[in-house]
Amino acid sequence: MAMKAKTQLVTGDDGVAIITLNNPPLNLLSFEVMLSLKSSIEEALLCNEVKAIVVNGSGGKFSGGADVKVFGKSEMVKKRNEVGFVSIELITNLLEAARKPLVAAIDGPAFGGGLEIALACHARISTPTSQLGLTELQYGIIPGYGGTQRLPRLVGLPKALEMILMSKRVNGKDAFSMSLVDAVAPADELIRSASRWALDISEARKPWIRSLYRTDRLEPLKEARLILNTARDEAQKQNPNVTHPLICIDVIEEGIVSGARIGLWKEAEALNELRQSETCKSLVHIFFARYNTSKLQISGITDMGLQPRKVNRVGVIGLGSTAIATAFILANFPVIFKEDDENSLEAALGEIKGKMTKAKLERTVSLLKGVLSYDSFKDVDLVVEAVEGSIRLKQQVFADLEHYCPQHCILASSSPTLDLNLIGERTKFQFRIAGAHFCSSSVLEIVNTECTSPQVIVDLLDVAKKMKKTPISVRNGSGLVVNRICGMYSQAAMFVAAEQGEEGKHRVEQVMDKFGMATSPFRMMDVVVESMSTQSQNKQDTGSSNSTWKEAKDSPNDFKVAKLSEEVIMKMILFPVVNEACCIMEEGGVGKASDIDVASVVAMGFPSYRGGVVYWADHTLGSKYICSTLETWSNAYGPFFKPCAYLRKHSSIGTPLMQIKSHL
């Protein structure tokens, strides 16, 4: 069976061949796509009727770049002599060296390899809103289709370094101002404009420019080396644990010093090696983990083709909800805030307004309304309850909400450990009830029960997106998953610091900073203290979980250690976090281990280039080593380090923790 063509070639009456990348939805550059592009270019070059060529992408999207799924694998390069095939043989020797001009018509994304194809064309025309960028470094690799050589020659070294090292994206308008594209055209005129430009090159009315050999935008060698050395210093300072930014700078320098063709070979060889690196594999893992989490794939819910309903107005209830109300207002949701008495309401509104800058205060006042009754809830689309008190009080609140709110309104509780079925016991329509845990500035935990409508979950996912929060699906009644791992991180750090003398806290911070943690464990504690208080109250009502969290609070007196090395400090702080992650999985608290990886990176500051705390545990020391080490420490220092049953079980059979799946 013949493989479906990944490009389309159409030649118009004007003699311009239009080659369209056709691998929807993003026209990713698989090896098959590149071979199809090669075939289409060769066909157009052999056709006597073709005077010039325009390359574009189907569906209003030029190309999202290479398929990330192959990073960390060897599909693209199976033999040593294939290194550089795409970059040199196809893009440089065929496309850029073509005897007929090629012009890239860019709409939508032109990222990574997609932009590199455009850079090798003899001109680039884009729409004003198109997005252009070399985004490879966020995956632990470098631009590998000539981007390290061509971009500096088009926009100059400082701007090129900024775009490459920061994976920075620019729109078409900005790309034109920095000479990355030659002209800007509206989407409905893009192909015509690119065709005219290509014909003008063919008929010598516009210059025929091969960007690989341009030198007019490059700084003199001495100045270029100063710029590159400054970039090296900044890259090392920003992230001393990874090497691919430094390798990228070396590749750029090689092309400037020794010539672009030599630079291309160095680039291709570096790309081949970096694709197999642990950094690349870790970053690709967390990329897909975050992608899957943002989509929150729940069988029977998110695969039903439902579209989110618009949430126009939000109701918020309870003393513990001022931060929740603030988060909604910052996302431009109108909020109706209810309290039981005038003094409490005035204090809460003052607290919300106090969190706003002067610039946002006027907008806040227009979006915030304080009330003392449910009468104003008749037109809200979502209510979040954060009432402090007994389960009976919460049941009454939800019964009242059902009476006053419209039938489509979502009724959400922010109570982390209470059973939603129990909270909604006195309501008639439990399909409207869900959990919404605002456990950090960046994460929204979403809880559904067996009664929750799929439409409600889809709506909450859309709310999370508009609030720019990462959604994580959490089991009903399992507690704040994010706060459990963040709290364990802080607890372990405090225990270790307390036993290391006067310099203990400073030493712990140094060690964790050196490991790559973005947030101090002591600053992290401020984030979770309020939720710890809420959990403590709820556990009085429901009983505690299997978590070592409760043991952490009860066992500091058992913790006595001698002077520790940096490596042991790191392990004594992070191994309990791995253990807590296993406790969460044991309880079925999340749908998959990678959800905890996302939580650890987004909320705890775990370095993304290590893949998340569970992935790191699997791919560095392994569950057997972590479990046996925790058992040793537990015997020596107390139950804080005791490995949970799930970790012991999977350690004994050698199962990677990433393979653990719950029954969520």
Image: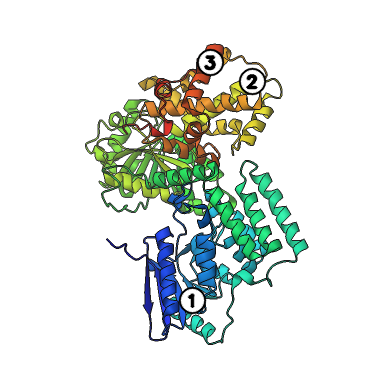
Distance between mark 2 and mark 1 Cα atoms? 63 Å
- The structure residue drawn at horizontal position 35% and vertical position 39%, both measured from the top left corner, is 412
Q: Position of residue 585 (x, y in %)?
A: 39, 29
Task: List the residue tagged with mark 1.
Answer: 185
Q: Which three-letter amino acid code belongs to the residue tagged 1?
A: Ala
Q: Of helix, strand and loop, which one carries label 1?
A: loop
Task: List the residue tagged with mark 3.
Answer: 632
In the image, 544 versus 432, the foreground residue is: 544
In the image, is residue 499 above or below residue 350?
above
Q: Position of residue 236 (x, y in %)?
A: 67, 46
Distance between mark 3 and mark 2 Cα atoms? 20 Å
Color encoding of the figure: rainbow
**Sooner in the amino-acid sequence: mark 3 or mark 1:** 1
Q: Which three-letter amino acid code belongs to the residue tagged 2?
A: Ala
Task: Specify whether residue 135 is in view.
Answer: yes
Q: Position of residue 216 (x, y in %)?
A: 69, 72
Task: List the residue tagged with mark 2.
Answer: 498
